Image (cartoon, rainbow, N blue to C red):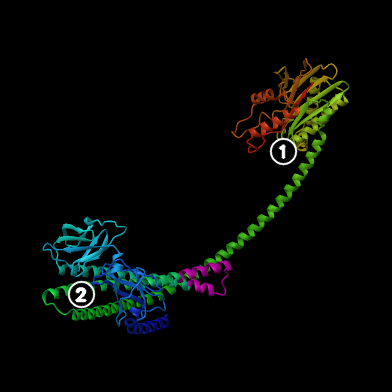
Amino acid sequence: MHRSFAFYLTVFFSSLWLCLGYLTEVSAQERAEGQLQNTKGEPVAGVEVAMVGVRGVKTDASGYFNIPLPAGKSVTPSSKFTVNGHVARDLKIDNTGYIFITMKASHAEKLNFVSVFVLDTAKKPIPNLAVTLDGVVHTTDATGKFKLTLKNETKPNYNSFSAKDLSVKNVQEVDDRNVKIVVSGGNTSSRIAAFESKFNSVLANVEKEKESLIKNGEEIKKEIESISNELNNDKSKLTAEEKQALKDNLGKLQSALLANEEAFLAAQQQTKKVMSQLTSVIMQSQDSMRKEIQKLNIEKTQSEEESRRRIMFISLVAVVLLISAVGFFIIAKRIGRQKKEVEAANAALEITKNDLVDKMTQISQQKNEIELQKNTIEKRNISIMASMNYASRIQKAMLPPIENLGIKDSFILFKPRDIISGDFYWFSDIGDQRVIAIADCTGHGVPGAFMTVLGNDLLNEIVMHEGITHPGSVLQKLDELVIQTFHHDRSVEGMSKTLSRLGNATNINRVNDGMDISIVSYNKKTLEMEFSGAKQPLCRFRNGQIEWIRGSKFPIGSVQFRKPKVFESVKIDTQPGDIFYLFSDGYQDQFGSSKTKFLIRNFRKLLTDIHKLPFSVQRERLEASLDEWRGGGQTPQTDDILVMGFKI
């Protein structure tokens, strides 16, 4: 740290020595400074002055201009300048590089000026007075006059005129181009003192701004050094994208550092500008006083003021360099302290980095374990789904096709909730007698599917082998066989085995598994029909009128009832054109998007609306209404759905 400090100190004093000798020679060449005046020697304000090939600036209230020059540009005797776009012909450059431009009358007329004369109560002009009009600061010349440039022929608001320690007594517009303003109070000395106070205030602000710019520059340099070290670190694990991002950030920081240095130069120029304005005020004030008192030679006065301006400039440079030296020592100490802080921070970051690497390793291991478990579950799901799909094909093969029903006008809507269903339909012919059944077994999915296989086999046994076609007798026999199947071994162990085999071991002390079923049997020649239901009704339409024929309140297979279960047959008189519907409770129990069930009353209304339509269309309408009720499939299917319709 001490070696670095000695190095920086040597560089600083070397640069300081070069600056002292070089500053007075090239400061004017780095910026084009001068004054614009008319042929009467009056300053011209608000006019754009430009060096050919360089962006121009506007003159201030005293006609001064200060044009920043790019690298490689300097003011030479052959330099050309423009005034409001016109090449300046009357141009003088003194040996210090200061520029005097006299503006032609033809150009001045295009500026549309208004001359404002500031007078005291004795009607005498007040020179070198800083005034404000329409929010813009102006300074009167030796004749107490300043000029306004009209914008779009807009008349100035003379009521906004103000000057420190003075009050407006009268405003007289002599004509469109001349205005007199009479003020009272104040004197030349107080105005000079006020301007000096303003100069000191501005100088203090500039110094504060310089300190801020120095601090900001060091912070930017620190960030640049940090990024450069990271980019030059061979052990860095940065990706190409991250390195490019750091390089882009480095470029932005370097641009910011350059802008900071330019702002520092601008602050120095502001100091020179204020100093120049103060010098001008003092020069003009002293010139006026000498004219009034001694009428001294103008050239001598200008020589003295020029010498004073140079002395003040050199003094200001010395102050700036002194402040820079103090700032340098402070910054050098701060660099050493910050270097230690950075080293400590880097050590802490290295520890944090190692901890993060360990945590990332643990996370990677956990991720691999989760991925392995996920693959195992997916394989099991694939196997289970394959088995379920195979079971579905078996169940569909068990159910007879609708064509075998032998009824032209008929349909079956069969929608399992899961892949396999707990609902099934069955029909068969025994001679002239046709038996049709719709059943809703206990449970869904695999448990319900087991019950459908059992129910299908038992109906084949009862109707096909034993020849029973009377609906009540079929249900009575079916109830006995289901109970015997579940209760062939009344011991707890035997019942548990039976339930486990069927996939539903919910209660080993009382078995309530079975089914709700409705059966119709009719003679194909005489059309005589009988119906019996176990907790399921039969719906008939005749001449547009609906008739609801209820079945028994007992289900098939349950042993929870103390009274003997009786399944009675109901004889139904039929006529050609009668339409019948058999169904499970799945359709009316379906929940909709409003979280309410479809309900039996809506199902009855739906059947009433569609029963006269062709049976293929009826099936489509039932599916469409169900899909609409579920909100286009947003609500999951609640139960297995089975609806059969036919006409005899």
Predominant secondary structure, magenta span: helix
Residue designated by label 2: 283
Is residue 573 visible from the viewing direction of this image? Answer: yes
Residue designated by label 1: 418
Residue 480, position as x, y percentages in the image: 79, 25
- Compute the Cα span from label 1 to label 2: 103 Å
Identified at 38% across, 79% down, the residue is: 74
* Figure quadrant of residue 317: bottom left
Residue 414, position as x, y percentages in the image: 74, 32
Identified at 34% across, 81% down, the residue is: 77
Quarter containing the N terminus: bottom left
Q: Is residue 631 left or right of residue 427?
A: left
Residue 100, position as x, y percentages in the image: 29, 76
Is residue 239 visible from the viewing direction of this image? Answer: no
Taking the magenta stretch, the answer to whether it contains residue 252 is yes
Please report contact status of discs 1 and 2: CB closer than 8 Å, yes or no: no
Task: Sort mark 2 into few (<14), some (14-19) or many (20+) by Cα contacts within 10 Å.
Answer: many
508 or 543: nearer the eye? 543
Q: Is residue 376 above or below residue 576?
A: below
* Figure quadrant of residue 524: top right
The amino acid sitting under disc 2 is Met
Q: Is residue 198 left or right of residue 267?
A: left
Q: Secondary structure at mark 2?
A: helix
Identified at 84% across, 28% down, the residue is: 460
* Figure quadrant of residue 157: bottom left
Quarter containing the C terminus: top right
The amino acid sitting under disc 1 is Asp
The magenta stretch is 226-254
Q: Earlier in the sequence, mark 1 or mark 2?
A: 2
